[in-house]
Image: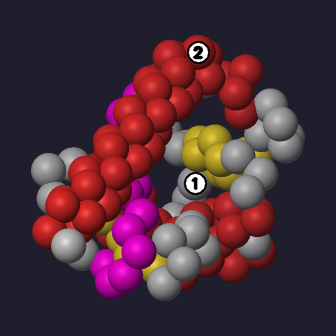
Amino acid sequence: MSLYSKVLWKVVLLHGISMPIHAGVFLAGQSSAWMDEVVVLHWVDQVLKPYILEAPLNVVPLLLLDSYRCHMMALVVMWINELGVEVQHFPGGCIGLCQPVDVGVVKSFKDNLKNQWESWMIEEEAMQDRELSWRS
């Protein structure tokens, strides 16, 4: 059995239109900024397919996905399977068990960043209010 592993590009989902691939990051846009079937299929075409084409012939690629609705859609799984990739889905609520850094470190970082951003926004608004009241 051969083992071949490669980390695929991260997906950054933006509110708006899709953008070209840049520096190992797949940028995509969607009107509600949520992952959907169209974005997943675009990722399959732009990121997964080129990876599969360069993988060794004696390897059956395995793609592990969470149970998010668009990852489970028949068309998405079919497109991935047609590339010769086996798809396995983690049961709902279990992905955090496989990503301890995301759960233990990144969540704390994001929470701290959000708190600092909210504090900055409140201070900015208060400063603008002071400037407006000072001018009147």
Along the horizontal axis of the image, is 67 left or right of 25? right
Residue at the (57%, 67%) spot, across then down: 35
Residue at the (69%, 79%) spot, across then down: 75
Q: Nearer the viewer, residue 58 or 19?
A: 19
Label 2: element kind: helix
Task: Give residue 28's quadrant in the image.
Answer: bottom left
Q: Nearer the viewer, residue 126 or 40?
A: 126
Task: Give residue 90's quadrant in the image.
Answer: top right
Can you say whether 39 is above or below 99 in the image? below
Q: How far apart in space, not on screen, are marks 2 and 1 (Cα)? A: 31 Å
User: Which numbered disc, 2 or 1, marks the residue that appears first in the sequence?
Assistant: 1
**Could you say where residue 9 lies in the image, as x and y percent from the top left?**
33, 48
On the rendered image, what quadrant is the N terminus found in? top right
Q: Nearer the viewer, residue 6 or 11?
A: 11
Label 1: element kind: loop
Mark 1 residue crowding within 10 angstroms, few (<14) / some (14–19) / many (20+) = some
Task: Report the residue marked by disc 1.
Answer: 85
Mark 2 residue crowding within 10 angstroms, few (<14) / some (14–19) / many (20+) = few
Three-letter residue code for mark 2: Gly
Q: What label sits on residue 104 in the rendered view?
A: 2
**Could you say where residue 115 lies in the image, as x and y percent from the top left?**
47, 34
Task: Give residue 136's quadrant in the image.
Answer: bottom left
Magenta residues, as a range? 1-18
